Image (spheres, rainbow, N blue to C red):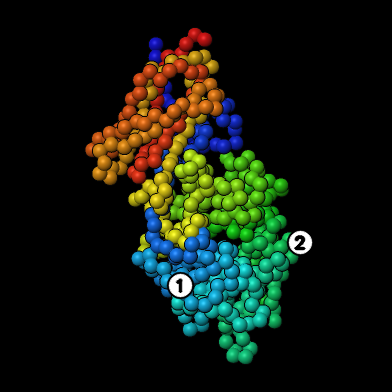
Amino acid sequence: MAKQTLIPLDQKPYYNTDAIANSIATDDMVDCYLEPVPGVGFITRRRPGLALFGDTGAGAGGDGIFYWEAADKVIAISGGKAFNVSSGGVCTQLTGTFPSTGVQTVFADGQTLAGVPWLYMAANGLVYTTDGATLVTPTDANTPAASHVAWINGRFVANEPGTNRFDFTDTNPATLVMENDYWSATDNPLTCEARGDKLSALFTAWQEIYCWGTEGLEIWQDDSITPFSPIPGAFAEAGIEGPYACGKVDNTIFALCVIEGKRCVIRLNQRSPLIVSEPIARILSEMSTVSDATCDIISSGGIAVALFSFPTDNQSWAYDYKNDIWLKWGYYNIFSGTHDRFLGQHSCFAKSWNKHLIQSRLDGKIYEVTRNSFVDGTNPLVSYRRTAWVDKGTWKRKRSEQLFIKGKVYPKGASSYVLQLRWRDDGNPIWSNLMDLDINPDFQGDFIHPLNRMGMYRSRQYEFRMSDNVDFILSGAWEDVEVMRN
């Protein structure tokens, strides 16, 4: 007699176990996210798409984008050029010379004593703008060729690449005025001495300076005298793996680090590192190079993730820090039928426009991250979720009498959509052919799709795939199976 059993789809994915041995947790999930539903668990939804917002025309991948709130402007860097991006997506190049090409840009906004907005950009050299139209290179001979710059308490600070030192702006003795382009203070440079490593990343948060080296994190404060000094005891035993592999969000900091020989993503908890990457620990350990890793904070339509991209290994992993879930996000390669790393890199939230923007890693385009589009530019967004190897708790053969798939779409005028399904049995690496399932939702977008006589297996893995430009929810699946005697 057939018995109805649920196919486990409400579990967080876990990537460290052997897929064949895993009969509970999701084996793989790409370009999706899990939405918690009280009393139910998690349902599977597609990640936001990327809708074209603007194009710098530079032809090269984006190197940095920043919402300059004081001036209500978005500044984007691409192909060694800086652009002022309007709220309508029009990109106008700033005059002046940018210090480098193909180097990630770090931004820091501050102001003059008179309250004039001031924006520095660091990319193996410093330039600034005060009007969003012109780039200015500081003329001070002691200006550091910085890769990182930040603002704290009326001063800019910037690192000296390849060293454990950083500099700060100060009062110019010739004018007796605090000047944002005066880098020749007699107390410069300041030296991070807690470890014998070099300073890889520098930023400010909560009125403190975070000086991150390859062996540990040193935190400095404004002591109003020197003017900065390290906070006694404020040191984290976690060396950062890449100069741009960190992000600040949710009143904390996420970063790709090494702790006692273990490569991991950490979350700072009152200056102490907590490892949050155990579900992908094996994958991180097997990556060949992570020094080029980046971290982008993406928030759109209620989804909030820290997105870590690894260019050398062609992977992107999104950490849903609200629900403690790791998700694999990518960019569908229509030629190979596989997913490359995520199309977007370097993001910002334009507050007054209420838009989440991200640059393309392929060209000068700028996209809006949105829940109203489920394509990546002109490329299809192919989302899929695989089940674990389902064996119903026994290795005996099972006959699948009927499979039911429950879900929801948010219609955009079409009367039907296509959900694709395939499966493989008993550990076999070969998949069945993709089956197109015509989904005909009701007026509220809900559907239940039955499939009859699904064959025999000892263990089976299903894959549910969606590529239509529509918001799709996979609520659950169950099947009527009869367990054989052998």
The secondary element bearing badge 1 is classed as strand
The percent position of residue 390, horizontal first and vertical second, equals 49, 24
What is the C-alpha distance between the residues marked 2 and 1?
A: 42 Å
Question: Residue at left 43%, top 60%?
Answer: 366
Q: Residue furthest left?
A: 443
Judge whether 265 appears above or below 416 on screen.
below
Judge whether 167 appears above or below 299 on screen.
below
Q: Which mark is residue 196?
A: 2
The percent position of residue 453, horizontal first and vertical second, equals 38, 18
Q: Residue 197, located in which quarter of the rendered image?
A: bottom right
Q: Can the viewer see residue 392 in this picture?
A: yes
Q: Nearer the viewer, residue 53 or 405?
A: 53
In the image, what residue type sits under mark 1? Answer: Gln
Q: Which residue is mark 1?
A: 93
Question: Residue at left 66%, top 47%?
Answer: 288
Question: Residue at left 34%, top 50%?
Answer: 372
The percent position of residue 429, horizontal first and vertical second, equals 55, 27
Report the side of 324 relative to 90 (left or right): right
